[in-house]
Amino acid sequence: MHSKNWTKTNAEGMQVLSGFYYQKVPFLELDSVDLLEKIPPMERINGFSALDTEKGIFREFKDSLTDKRVYVYVDNLTNQKIKLVHHDSLKLYINLKDSTETDKLYQFLLAKVVKEPK
């Protein structure tokens, strides 16, 4: 359970669970969805790294004076990552072990950000 991202979607949003890290992203609060090769350099507040896995709560270096948290659920650092921005400024980076599953999730979320009016 600690080494894999578990995602669940329903009509209202997406839930991500990895170990004891949990995030809920309502589709109506989804601001943007991007696909990235690399995540930006960040400082880990708590979490762990193991091989190609990166999980936890981080802070971007440029925001080191603030307490803006960035949530990272990356199962494979070598594959592309999805960057979600929700609630105006909250960031979440995620990918799944299988790159085709990550791409399916990206396409699904991209359709949600386009279709759901604010």
Image: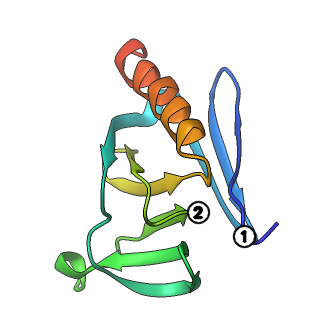
Give the CA separation, mark 2 to mark 1: 7 Å
Residue 92 in percent (x, y) is at 44, 56
The reply to whether residue 106 is in sight is yes
Residue 83 in percent (x, y) is at 37, 49
Q: Give residue 75's mark.
A: 2
Residue 30 in percent (x, y) is at 42, 35
Q: Quadrant of residue 114?
A: top left
Badge 2 vs badge 1, beta-carbon distance below 8 Å = yes
Q: Residue at x 57, y 81 (%)?
A: 51
Q: Residue at x 38, y 56 (%)?
A: 91
The reply to whether residue 26 is in sight is no
**Label 1: element kind:** loop
Q: Indicate the quadrant containing the C terminus: top left, top right, bottom left or bottom right.
A: top left
Mark positioned earlier in the residue sequence (2 or 1): 1
Q: Residue at x 55, y 37 (%)?
A: 100
Vertical position of residue 99 compared to residue 5: above or below = above
- In front here: 75 or 99? 99
According to the picture, the residue beneath numbered tag 1 turns out to be 3
Vertical position of residue 14 compared to residue 76: above or below = above
**Label 2: element kind:** loop
Label 1 neighbour load within 10 Å: few <14, some 14-19, many 20+: some
Vertical position of residue 86 compared to residue 20: above or below = above
